[in-house]
Structures are given as C-alpha cells and as structure tokens.
Image (cartoon, rainbow, N blue to C red):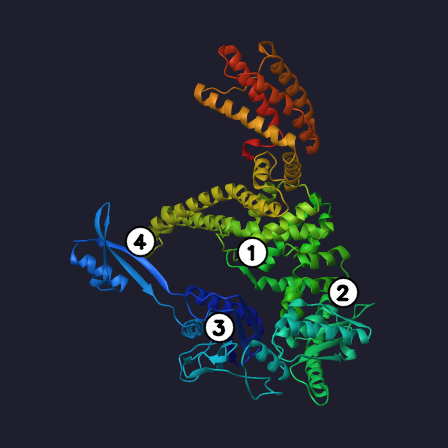
Amino acid sequence: MPDLLIELFSEEIPARMQARAAEDLKKRVTDGLVEAGLTYAGAAALSTPRRLTLAVDGLLAESPTIREERKGPKVGAPDKAIEGFLRGAGLTRDQLEERETPKGAVYFALIEKPGRAAAEIIAEVLETTIRTFPWPKSMRWGAGTLRWVRPLHSILCILSDEAGATVVELDIDGIKSGNITRGHRFMAPDQITVTGFDDYAAKLKRAHVVLDPRERAEAIWQEATNQAFASGLEVVEDKGLLAEVAGLVECPVVLMGAIDAEFLELPAEVLQTSMKEHQKFFSVKKNKTGRIEKFITVANRETVDNGATILAGNQKVLSARLADAKFFWENDLRTAKSEAGMGSWVENLGNVTFHNKLGTQAARIDRIAALAREIAPDVGANAGLAEQAARVAKADLSSEMVYEFPELQGLMGRYYAQAAGLPQEVANACEQHYSPLGPGDDVPSEPVSVAVALADKLDTLTGFWAIDEKPTGSKDPFALRRAALGVIRLVLENDVRVGLKSVFAAGLAKQPKKASLEGALYYLESEVDRVKGLLSDPTYLGTLISGTRKELEEQLPAMERELKALAAELAEYTKYLDHAPTDLLSFFHDRLKVFLRDQGIRHDVIDACIAMDGNDDLTLLVKRARALEDFMKTEDGTNLLQGFKRANNILSQAEEKDGVEYSYGADRKFAEDDTEKALFDALEAGGAAISPAIEAEDFAAAMRGMAALRAPIDAFFEAVQVNADSDIVRRNRLNLLSQIRQVCGQVADLTKVEG
C-alpha cells in the first residue's frame, strides 16, 4: 500500500493561519480520498511559514470496483420512464434484466463502476482542495485565477512504495506538481529531490528546516529558559506568543538581549506588552523582584557572528519603541498627579460614544457609579469608596498608554490611581472591575472591587436589555452571556445575598431611553399647548398675518398625531420595562444552568429550585440546588421522589376528574389503616422539621426531614388504595396526598425532577 506526501510551498503564511490551514488540508484531502473509495491507515499535517505538508500512510493503490443493483420501472412502462432510468444508470436497454416480482415483471440494472488508480483520484481531490481552500484572506497574483494566502510556488505530490516514488501529475494555473522542494530561504535555498516522507523530513532538517511546529516551539522554549537560567533570570511564560513565534521561523535561533537601563523602571506589564505586541519578544524577569531586565528574540537563521548583528538591530528598534512607551507613561503620570487628575480623563469620555442608544462613556460611568453605591451594602463595601472607584475605574481609557495598548486598560488605571493618591481599594477596583472575563479568570474578592465589577456588568446587561438588543441563538455581539456569567461568579464566589430583580429594575430605570422618550413627550406637549394658546388668543391672532395663522392651523393636527404616537410608544416601552427584569432573570437562569451543569448539577434539579420563591437570590438558589442534588443521589432521595410523583399523579388525576382542589387538610379521624395513621404522624413531624430548616436556609436539615418521609409514604402506598369505595375516605386520602405535596414542596418543586 503506497504512502502519499503532499507539500504546498509558498511565500510566508501568517503565523495565526498555519495550524488551521494544516488541519483544513488534512481534512479536505482525506475526506475527498475516502469519499472516492481510497481508505488509509493514518494521516498527519505539519506546517512551517513557507509550507503546508500532509503525509498519508497506508493508502489503497486503487479504489475498489463497486457493483450496484438498481430496480427500475415495470416491463411495458412508457418509453420515457425507461429512457430516464437508462440515463441514470448509464446503460442501454439491452443491458437491462427482466425479473418477475409479486407486482409483475420489472427491469433491473446491474451497474458496475470499475476502480480507479490512486494517482487519478489524488490529482482530482488535491486540485479541488487547492482551488477551494478556506483561507481567511487570500490573494491573486500574476495572470492566473488561483487564489492563495500568499503566492504559491510549487506543489510536491508523490506516491511511494517499495518500488520507489511516483509523481502524481497535476497542473494548476501553470504550477506543475513534482518531487522537488526547497530548504531554508537563506541557508539552503537550493532544490531538494525527495522520495517519501522520511526522506523529505530528513533532507529538510539538513537544509535547516524544522518541519514540526511543536518541535520548533519546544526548541525555542528550552533554549530561551536555558539562556535565562544561566543569567539567573526567568522567562515570562506566554503560550500564545510561543505558538506565534514558532510560526514565524523555520530554523529558530534564540538570542537574549538587554533592555536599556533608562526603561527598566517602566511597569513590568508595559515592558512586556510593548515587546510582545511590537517586536514579538519574550520578557525575561529577575526572580526575586519580578522586574523585567532582558528580552528573548528568535531569529530565522544562523549567522557567522552568532546573531550579534541581529541582536543589535533588535535592541535599537526596541529602544525606540520603549521610548514611546516611556513618553506615554510619564505624560499620563503628570496628568494623574495634576489638580484635575483622573477627572479630566473622565470628562474626555463625554466625547466617546458607548452606544448610540445608550449614550457616552461618561454617562455610562454616572450610571455605574450610582449602581455601585446601591450595591455596596449588599457586598459589604463602603458606599462612598464604591462610588469613587466607579467614577475613576474607566478613566484610563483616555490615557495615552491605553490608547496605544488597549489590553492594558484597568491595569494602568490601578497605577494612575495610586499615583493620584487615591485609596488602595479604589486603585485595586480600577484593575479588577473588568474581571472575571472568562470561566478561568480570577474573581475579585475585595468588597469595593466586587461592587464596581457587578455594577459595570449589570449596567451593560440592563442597558442592552433596555434597548432590546438581546443575544439570539449563537449571536451575542455585545458579549452579554459572558457578562451574565461574570455576575453569577461574582455573586456565588463572594457569597453575595441580593435580589437581582430589584437590582435589574434599578439598572433599567437608569438607562437613557425612557428619559429620552419622556423628555420628547414633554417638549411636544408644550409645543402643542403653545400652538393652541396662540390660536385661541384673539389679541395675538389680530397681529398675525393670515398666512402664519393658516400655517399654525395646518401644523396642529400633525403635531397632535405625533404626540399621540409618542405617548403610545412611551406607554408600550414602560410596559416592556415592567417585564424586562423578569425576562433578564430568565436569561440569568439559563446561564446558571450551564454554569452548574459543568459542576455536575442536573438541569432538572436546577429547574426544581428555580421554580421556588426567592429565585433571584442566586446564592440561595444554588445552595438549595446543591443540597437537592446530593439528596437525589441517595437511595432515600430516589425512593422518596418516586413516592412523591405517585402521590402527585394520583392527586392531579383526581382533581382534574372531580373538578376540585384537594388542599383543605386531611383529618386523622378518618384514617382506617395503621400505615395511613403513621403517614399522618410523619407528615406532621416532617412539616415541623422542614419548615424551620427552610427558614434557616439549612437545606441539608430539610433534606433529612424529607428522607424521614420515605418509609411512611412507601408503606402507605403498599397497604392502602387511595380511591376507596367510601367517598369520605377517598377525599380524606386525596387531601393526605396534598399534604405530601405541600410538605415536600417547601424544599423544591419536585414535579420538575426527572425520575
């Protein structure tokens, strides 16, 4: 069975596209081969900046012959029907076979598709793959029609077995396939003839090309850490940068350089970000102080001076970049320490639109500050500090440093708040209020930071809910799902007790749309009253020329119609706002289900707890759900659930049949069986145990109270027929079942828990 080797050799492919492109090449080629009948033993895709490589092992030499039997029309059917069948089968009439069936004589076609040589199939599949390759961006060059991420120079495509290697013939816009590749652009640019993957990989290695991106990344990291360790330093880990740099070089050469002393006092994050974003350098820090003192760069070639010239050039460019960063830093510090301080930056945000329906960033800061003050007592924060922190938390968006490096927002806010002499809690909130950004991000725990982080995310959510810009399906352009998950984590991990519906209502009330509608309505009402006043004032009318009066009379009906429409819009919007907190809470419950499901809590258990009062207190809801989940995993929980469902089903059917509600209390004097009397006693004791436990939010104790009901309920159903012949006994037993539902329903809505 032959092996297939494909290499698509081009100008440099952007590093961010290489891994995906290698997987796309593998999937499209192997899927095409399998669809054509060519199976294989294994496949691997690799990439360098200049080549995509695919190796397929154990490929069939040819596709198998396929024989298919196809049933056709009846013998004697119209000629057009038979001719259509023949065209589909690719046969002539004399090749059809007549067979007797229970429905009469029918034509059958025996279709045989002979196998095809692997080379023929590969050529077709590879050409289709190249011409339809899903690059995020592609280009044309020369006079051809082919599009590729960068100009494609050559196609290597060979089949190899024990007998040798054979080129798979292919010609795409004048680029003919062959068995030729090239080594490193500078150190081994000559052509290389290969006979198979092992030969190909070995010759490329000798030609200074490391084919496997993982091998390049490992080599870079090992050499970088070794050089740093030798100087008593440590490389700052950055997996994303490592993967990117590994995609920039075919022959990685690691070099370590020093940062000029004048830049060493810049914040470590500024140095790291500047070097990473502009130069793709790794930062090297001192172990004890954490101060960044050197950098690691990765060259794409070996030089006679061991990289000295490359390093000198990089250091020169880096110094220019860091000089800019130092200029931004010093300017920003002067502003932060000035009399106006960070307040001047906040004022500048009045010229920055957050959203055309939600106002400016400065207006948003006012809303966040008011909301943070309201939330502060619920999280144990000082209300004044929470408001102060909210007012400066986004000030750094106007700073020169954050304008240059947006990813430093928040972090620079902390530095500037400290420089301005603001309380440390305020400075920390500037950095932490964006968190958590994702499932693995740390959650702030300082009360002031928690208050501002919650206010920030809640303003975002209530703002977009206020203008009806909600996530739909897979679309979430404003990252509202992430914001809701952030609120959930902030609440749960800080054990915050707050009713979210009231917070939502407060946030929605602060959004500008309703005030805008009310302002427009007030203005229009005033204009209508003014015009009516002019038209009804005989003294004033006597001074008007007829044309002006006529214009006013014509304008008034249109103004009144507009006023009526605006009033209706405001009424409808007010109605929408009244329902919005409930709708937003439902959105939160959906996000909470996803969050808890990842922690092993079943969706039906969560639904059972959401159905209870107080479901906008997420801490209480989750506490209840965890206790119920644990209980449902026990034998008592499983059996009690079955008993409850049996009681509920019998009761529901009886209530529907009788048209009455059996909830007026059962009387023990009508009990006929000992198990029935025992259940009365158990329900009385259970209610006495469960109710105070629920009030005390001791859900574990409430579950123990429910567990005590399991045996009496089981015994009752074993010994007693609920639908007794006596109407009095039947009604009493149905009311007893209602007590089961009522007592157990204090814990959760067990009707929503699956059996």
* Mark with earlier residue (1, 4): 1
- Earlier in the chain: of badge 3 and badge 1, it is 3
Residue 489, percent from left and from top? 65, 49
User: Pointer 3: what residue?
Assistant: 137
Is residue 81 something one can see in this rendering?
yes
Does residue 707 appear to the left or right of 142 in the view shown?
A: right
Mark 4 vs mark 3: which is more N-terminal? Answer: 3
Q: CA distance from mark 1 to mark 2?
A: 32 Å
* Left or right of residue 367, residue 696 in this image: right
Image position of 384 with respect to 8: above or below: above
| CA distance separating discs 1 and 4 | 54 Å
Q: Which residue is mark 2?
A: 419
**Which amino acid does the dot numbered 4 rest on?**
Lys
Mark 1 or 2: the one toward you: 1
Which residue is disc 1 drawn over?
Answer: 479
Mark 3 neighbour density, 10 Å: few (under 14) some (14–19) many (20 or more): few
Report the mark closest to the observer, 2 or 3. Answer: 3
The residue under label 4 is 550
Left or right placement of residue 717 versus residue 217 in this view:
left
Q: Describe the element under mark 2 as helix, strand or loop.
A: helix
Q: Is residue 724 left or right of residue 528?
A: right
Asked if residue 528 is positioned above or below residue 680 in the image, the reply reads below
